[in-house]
Amino acid sequence: MTETAVPHSVRTAGGDPLDSAVWRLRSRGCWEDAAALVEPRAAAEPRAALRRAELLVERCMFTGEGWGRAEEALRAAESLSLDDEERGAAACERGYLAYASTLLRVRDRADEARAALGRSAALLAPDSPCRPLLDFRRGLMAEHVSGNPQAAEAGYRRAHNEALNRGDALLTSYTWRHLAALELLAGNPAEARHGFAESLRLREETGFLVGIAPALVALAEVEPEPESTRLRAEAARLFRLLDGVPRWLSAHLPPPGDT
Protein backbone atom coordinates (compact mmCIF):
# COMPACT_ATOMS: atom_id res chain seq x y z
CA MET A 1 0.00 0.00 0.00
CA THR A 2 1.45 3.35 -1.04
CA GLU A 3 0.96 6.68 0.54
CA THR A 4 1.61 10.28 -0.30
CA ALA A 5 3.76 12.83 1.40
CA VAL A 6 2.21 16.01 2.62
CA PRO A 7 3.13 19.34 0.95
CA HIS A 8 5.27 21.39 3.30
CA SER A 9 3.46 24.69 2.93
CA VAL A 10 -0.09 23.44 3.50
CA ARG A 11 0.32 21.12 6.47
CA THR A 12 -1.37 23.21 9.09
CA ALA A 13 -4.06 25.82 9.12
CA GLY A 14 -2.09 28.51 10.93
CA GLY A 15 -3.61 31.89 11.77
CA ASP A 16 -4.23 33.21 8.24
CA PRO A 17 -7.86 32.85 7.09
CA LEU A 18 -6.68 31.74 3.64
CA ASP A 19 -4.44 29.08 5.19
CA SER A 20 -7.36 27.85 7.25
CA ALA A 21 -9.67 27.66 4.25
CA VAL A 22 -7.06 25.88 2.14
CA TRP A 23 -6.42 23.38 4.93
CA ARG A 24 -10.13 22.60 5.40
CA LEU A 25 -10.55 21.86 1.71
CA ARG A 26 -7.32 19.94 1.30
CA SER A 27 -7.87 17.77 4.36
CA ARG A 28 -11.17 16.62 2.81
CA GLY A 29 -9.69 15.87 -0.60
CA CYS A 30 -10.93 19.04 -2.33
CA TRP A 31 -7.60 19.90 -3.95
CA GLU A 32 -9.00 21.74 -6.97
CA ASP A 33 -11.09 24.01 -4.74
CA ALA A 34 -8.13 24.66 -2.46
CA ALA A 35 -5.89 25.48 -5.43
CA ALA A 36 -8.53 27.88 -6.76
CA LEU A 37 -8.39 29.87 -3.51
CA VAL A 38 -4.64 30.33 -3.94
CA GLU A 39 -4.72 31.02 -7.68
CA PRO A 40 -5.30 34.81 -7.56
CA ARG A 41 -1.99 35.26 -5.76
CA ALA A 42 -0.12 32.59 -7.70
CA ALA A 43 0.52 34.69 -10.81
CA ALA A 44 2.90 37.02 -8.97
CA GLU A 45 3.78 35.44 -5.62
CA PRO A 46 6.24 32.54 -5.75
CA ARG A 47 5.11 30.95 -2.50
CA ALA A 48 1.48 31.07 -3.56
CA ALA A 49 2.43 29.54 -6.91
CA LEU A 50 4.32 26.77 -5.12
CA ARG A 51 1.39 26.14 -2.81
CA ARG A 52 -0.95 25.79 -5.77
CA ALA A 53 1.43 23.34 -7.42
CA GLU A 54 1.79 21.32 -4.21
CA LEU A 55 -1.95 20.92 -3.90
CA LEU A 56 -2.38 19.76 -7.48
CA VAL A 57 0.58 17.37 -7.25
CA GLU A 58 -0.92 15.78 -4.16
CA ARG A 59 -4.22 15.39 -5.99
CA CYS A 60 -2.40 13.26 -8.58
CA MET A 61 -1.15 10.85 -5.92
CA PHE A 62 -4.51 10.48 -4.21
CA THR A 63 -6.68 10.28 -7.34
CA GLY A 64 -4.40 9.27 -10.21
CA GLU A 65 -5.82 12.21 -12.16
CA GLY A 66 -4.94 15.81 -12.98
CA TRP A 67 -1.38 15.27 -14.22
CA GLY A 68 -1.60 18.03 -16.83
CA ARG A 69 -2.90 20.53 -14.31
CA ALA A 70 -0.10 19.70 -11.90
CA GLU A 71 2.55 20.04 -14.62
CA GLU A 72 1.11 23.40 -15.65
CA ALA A 73 1.13 24.65 -12.07
CA LEU A 74 4.73 23.52 -11.56
CA ARG A 75 5.91 25.21 -14.76
CA ALA A 76 4.12 28.40 -13.74
CA ALA A 77 5.82 28.38 -10.35
CA GLU A 78 9.23 27.63 -11.87
CA SER A 79 8.84 30.54 -14.32
CA LEU A 80 8.73 33.08 -11.49
CA SER A 81 11.78 34.72 -9.94
CA LEU A 82 12.60 32.23 -7.19
CA ASP A 83 15.30 32.21 -4.54
CA ASP A 84 17.23 29.02 -3.73
CA GLU A 85 14.74 27.94 -1.07
CA GLU A 86 11.84 28.31 -3.49
CA ARG A 87 13.72 26.60 -6.33
CA GLY A 88 14.52 23.76 -3.96
CA ALA A 89 10.88 23.44 -2.96
CA ALA A 90 9.81 23.47 -6.62
CA ALA A 91 12.36 20.75 -7.43
CA CYS A 92 11.05 18.70 -4.52
CA GLU A 93 7.53 18.91 -5.95
CA ARG A 94 8.73 18.06 -9.46
CA GLY A 95 10.54 15.04 -8.10
CA TYR A 96 7.48 13.95 -6.18
CA LEU A 97 5.22 14.30 -9.21
CA ALA A 98 7.62 12.16 -11.25
CA TYR A 99 7.73 9.63 -8.40
CA ALA A 100 3.92 9.47 -8.28
CA SER A 101 3.74 8.93 -12.03
CA THR A 102 6.24 6.08 -11.72
CA LEU A 103 4.63 4.49 -8.68
CA LEU A 104 1.11 4.58 -10.12
CA ARG A 105 2.40 3.28 -13.46
CA VAL A 106 1.19 6.27 -15.43
CA ARG A 107 4.65 6.76 -16.96
CA ASP A 108 8.11 5.73 -15.81
CA ARG A 109 9.79 8.95 -14.69
CA ALA A 110 12.14 7.47 -12.09
CA ASP A 111 15.27 9.14 -13.52
CA GLU A 112 13.51 12.51 -13.55
CA ALA A 113 12.39 11.99 -9.96
CA ARG A 114 15.91 11.19 -8.77
CA ALA A 115 17.40 14.15 -10.61
CA ALA A 116 14.81 16.60 -9.29
CA LEU A 117 15.09 15.40 -5.70
CA GLY A 118 18.87 15.59 -5.95
CA ARG A 119 18.60 19.14 -7.28
CA SER A 120 16.33 19.99 -4.36
CA ALA A 121 18.89 18.62 -1.91
CA ALA A 122 21.59 20.81 -3.46
CA LEU A 123 19.47 23.95 -3.29
CA LEU A 124 17.92 23.66 0.17
CA ALA A 125 19.86 24.82 3.20
CA PRO A 126 20.49 22.18 5.90
CA ASP A 127 18.00 23.92 8.20
CA SER A 128 15.39 24.52 5.50
CA PRO A 129 11.80 23.86 6.61
CA CYS A 130 11.42 21.80 3.41
CA ARG A 131 14.33 19.49 4.26
CA PRO A 132 12.33 16.94 6.33
CA LEU A 133 9.81 16.54 3.52
CA LEU A 134 12.63 16.08 1.04
CA ASP A 135 14.24 13.42 3.23
CA PHE A 136 10.91 11.63 3.47
CA ARG A 137 10.35 11.69 -0.27
CA ARG A 138 13.85 10.42 -0.96
CA GLY A 139 13.01 7.62 1.42
CA LEU A 140 9.92 6.83 -0.64
CA MET A 141 12.04 6.67 -3.78
CA ALA A 142 14.55 4.39 -2.08
CA GLU A 143 11.87 1.99 -0.86
CA HIS A 144 9.31 1.89 -3.65
CA VAL A 145 11.41 2.57 -6.75
CA SER A 146 14.98 1.52 -5.92
CA GLY A 147 14.05 -1.34 -3.61
CA ASN A 148 16.49 -0.25 -0.90
CA PRO A 149 14.73 -0.44 2.50
CA GLN A 150 17.91 0.44 4.41
CA ALA A 151 18.29 3.76 2.58
CA ALA A 152 14.56 4.32 2.93
CA GLU A 153 14.70 3.86 6.69
CA ALA A 154 17.57 6.35 6.98
CA GLY A 155 15.56 8.95 5.07
CA TYR A 156 12.40 8.28 7.06
CA ARG A 157 14.24 8.57 10.37
CA ARG A 158 15.87 11.87 9.43
CA ALA A 159 12.48 13.21 8.41
CA HIS A 160 10.82 11.77 11.52
CA ASN A 161 13.27 13.30 13.97
CA GLU A 162 13.16 16.72 12.34
CA ALA A 163 9.36 16.66 12.04
CA LEU A 164 9.17 15.90 15.76
CA ASN A 165 11.60 18.74 16.53
CA ARG A 166 9.53 21.16 14.45
CA GLY A 167 6.19 20.02 15.85
CA ASP A 168 5.01 18.97 12.40
CA ALA A 169 2.30 16.53 13.45
CA LEU A 170 1.09 15.63 10.00
CA LEU A 171 4.48 14.83 8.50
CA THR A 172 5.20 12.86 11.67
CA SER A 173 2.11 10.78 10.94
CA TYR A 174 3.61 9.88 7.58
CA THR A 175 7.00 8.99 8.99
CA TRP A 176 5.38 6.85 11.71
CA ARG A 177 3.39 5.06 9.00
CA HIS A 178 6.38 4.19 6.84
CA LEU A 179 8.75 3.34 9.66
CA ALA A 180 6.05 1.03 11.03
CA ALA A 181 5.71 -0.67 7.64
CA LEU A 182 9.44 -1.37 7.64
CA GLU A 183 9.19 -2.77 11.17
CA LEU A 184 6.45 -5.11 9.97
CA LEU A 185 8.61 -6.29 7.09
CA ALA A 186 11.44 -6.89 9.57
CA GLY A 187 9.19 -9.13 11.67
CA ASN A 188 8.55 -6.69 14.52
CA PRO A 189 4.74 -6.54 14.81
CA ALA A 190 4.67 -4.82 18.22
CA GLU A 191 6.80 -1.92 16.98
CA ALA A 192 4.73 -1.78 13.80
CA ARG A 193 1.48 -1.65 15.77
CA HIS A 194 2.80 1.26 17.83
CA GLY A 195 3.84 3.22 14.74
CA PHE A 196 0.57 2.62 12.89
CA ALA A 197 -1.43 3.62 15.97
CA GLU A 198 0.58 6.84 16.34
CA SER A 199 0.04 7.66 12.68
CA LEU A 200 -3.72 7.22 13.05
CA ARG A 201 -3.82 9.27 16.24
CA LEU A 202 -2.01 12.21 14.65
CA ARG A 203 -4.23 12.20 11.59
CA GLU A 204 -7.32 12.25 13.72
CA GLU A 205 -5.90 15.04 15.89
CA THR A 206 -4.96 17.21 12.92
CA GLY A 207 -8.26 16.56 11.15
CA PHE A 208 -6.59 15.09 8.07
CA LEU A 209 -9.76 13.30 7.02
CA VAL A 210 -8.52 12.13 3.63
CA GLY A 211 -5.60 10.36 5.28
CA ILE A 212 -7.50 8.54 8.01
CA ALA A 213 -8.76 5.59 5.95
CA PRO A 214 -5.21 4.57 4.89
CA ALA A 215 -4.10 4.81 8.51
CA LEU A 216 -7.00 2.58 9.61
CA VAL A 217 -6.12 -0.04 6.99
CA ALA A 218 -2.46 0.02 8.00
CA LEU A 219 -3.34 -0.54 11.65
CA ALA A 220 -5.74 -3.32 10.66
CA GLU A 221 -2.78 -5.23 9.21
CA VAL A 222 -1.34 -5.79 12.68
CA GLU A 223 -4.44 -5.98 14.85
CA PRO A 224 -6.10 -9.33 15.72
CA GLU A 225 -9.71 -10.13 14.94
CA PRO A 226 -12.32 -8.80 15.46
CA GLU A 227 -10.54 -5.44 15.72
CA SER A 228 -8.94 -5.85 12.29
CA THR A 229 -12.31 -6.32 10.61
CA ARG A 230 -13.78 -3.36 12.48
CA LEU A 231 -10.95 -1.07 11.37
CA ARG A 232 -11.29 -2.12 7.74
CA ALA A 233 -15.04 -1.58 7.84
CA GLU A 234 -14.54 1.90 9.29
CA ALA A 235 -11.97 2.66 6.58
CA ALA A 236 -14.38 1.44 3.89
CA ARG A 237 -17.16 3.72 5.14
CA LEU A 238 -14.83 6.72 5.18
CA PHE A 239 -13.51 5.80 1.72
CA ARG A 240 -17.04 5.84 0.31
CA LEU A 241 -17.81 9.10 2.13
CA LEU A 242 -14.87 10.69 0.34
CA ASP A 243 -16.04 9.40 -3.05
CA GLY A 244 -13.41 6.68 -3.34
CA VAL A 245 -10.31 8.69 -2.38
CA PRO A 246 -7.53 7.72 -2.19
CA ARG A 247 -8.11 5.61 -5.29
CA TRP A 248 -5.29 3.14 -4.61
CA LEU A 249 -6.86 2.14 -1.29
CA SER A 250 -9.76 0.24 -2.87
CA ALA A 251 -7.74 -2.97 -3.26
CA HIS A 252 -7.20 -3.09 0.52
CA LEU A 253 -10.86 -2.67 1.53
CA PRO A 254 -13.75 -5.12 1.88
CA PRO A 255 -16.49 -4.99 -0.79
CA PRO A 256 -19.40 -2.64 0.01
CA GLY A 257 -21.72 -5.54 0.86
CA ASP A 258 -19.34 -6.71 3.59
CA THR A 259 -19.61 -3.49 5.62
Image (cartoon, helix red, strand yellow):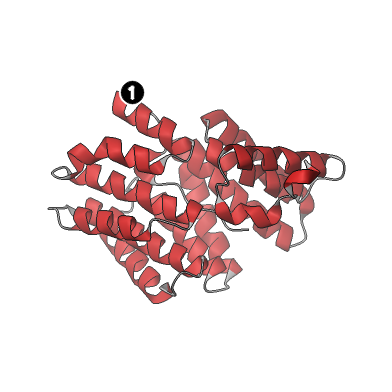
Query: Image point 66% across, 59% down: which residue?
Result: 182
Q: Tell me if residue 124 can be seen.
A: no
Query: Image point 27% across, 48% down: which residue?
Result: 50
Query: Of residues 246 and 97, which is closer to you in this image?
Result: 246
Across and down, in percent, residue 212 comes to 60, 39
Q: Tell me if residue 71 can be seen.
A: yes
Count of labels shown? 1
Quadrant in which the N terminus appears: bottom right
Q: Amino acid at mark 1?
A: Gly
Q: Residue furthest right?
A: 225
Residue receiving disc 1: 15
Across and down, in percent, residue 232 comes to 74, 44
Residue 48 against residue 101 in the figure, above or below: above
Across and down, in percent, residue 122 comes to 29, 64
Query: Image point 56% across, 67% down: which residue?
Result: 143
Question: In the image, is 203 to the left or to the right of 30?
Answer: right
Query: Of residues 173 and 36, which is closer to you in this image?
Result: 36
Query: Image point 62% across, 53% down: which residue?
Result: 249
Q: Residue furthest front?
A: 257
Q: Secondary structure at mark 1?
A: loop
Quadrant in which the C terminus appears: top right
| Label 1 Cα crowd, 10 Å radius (few <14 / some 14-19 / many 20+) | few
Q: Quadrant of residue 65?
A: bottom left
Q: Quadrant of residue 230?
A: top right
Question: In the image, is 258 to the left or to the right of 124?
Answer: right
Question: In the image, is 119 to the left or to the right of 202?
Answer: left
Residue 201 against residue 73 in the figure, above or below: above
Across and down, in percent, residue 165 comes to 46, 39
